[in-house]
Amino acid sequence: MRLLNIGFGVVGAIITLGSVVTGATVWLLFTNPVTIANAVNDGEISPFVQDLARVIFEALQGLLRYL
């Protein structure tokens, strides 16, 4: 039973992380489409990852201000 609870926790964490990354990607697609287009066109993913990390960091900062 304990292994089942750990499994549910891991699956929940993966789903939560995936949702955060998906939401940030959609946000970047609407707010900064040039970065996405350049990443797809050039094949260089690092500017996209940097912007994605920046968006997630700013969202976390905004959430932590309420605490």
Image (cartoon, rainbow, N blue to C red):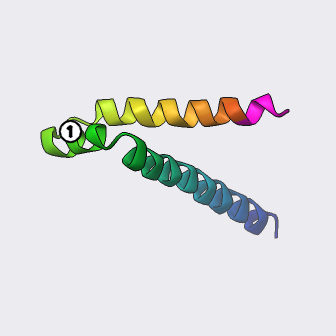
Q: Percent position (x, y) of residue 63?
A: 73, 37
User: What's the magenta bit mostly, secondary-structure-wise?
Assistant: helix
Q: Percent position (x, y) of residue 26?
A: 44, 52
- Residue 43 image-quadrant placement: top left
For the N terminus, give its image quadrant. Answer: bottom right
Q: Percent position (x, y) of residue 4?
A: 74, 68
- 49 sits to left or right of 43: right
Closer to the camera, 29 or 10?
Answer: 29
Q: Percent position (x, y) of residue 29?
A: 37, 48
Q: In this view, which residue lies farthest toward the left? A: 42
Residue at point 76%, 31% (across, down): 64
The residue stretch that appears in magenta? 63-67
Q: SS for tag 1?
A: helix
Give the answer, above or below, for where 4 lies relative to 16.
below
- Residue 46 image-quadrant placement: top left
The three-letter amino acid code for the residue at tag 1 is Asn
Q: How many marks?
A: 1
Neighbor class of circle 1 (other Cα within 10 Å; few <14, some 14-19, many 20+) is some
Residue at point 63%, 62% (across, down): 11
Residue at point 23%, 40% (across, down): 39
Residue 64: say if magenta.
yes
Residue 66: say if magenta.
yes
Closer to the camera, 17 or 57?
Answer: 57
Give the answer, above or below, for where 58 lies relative to 15.
above
Residue topped by disc 1: 38
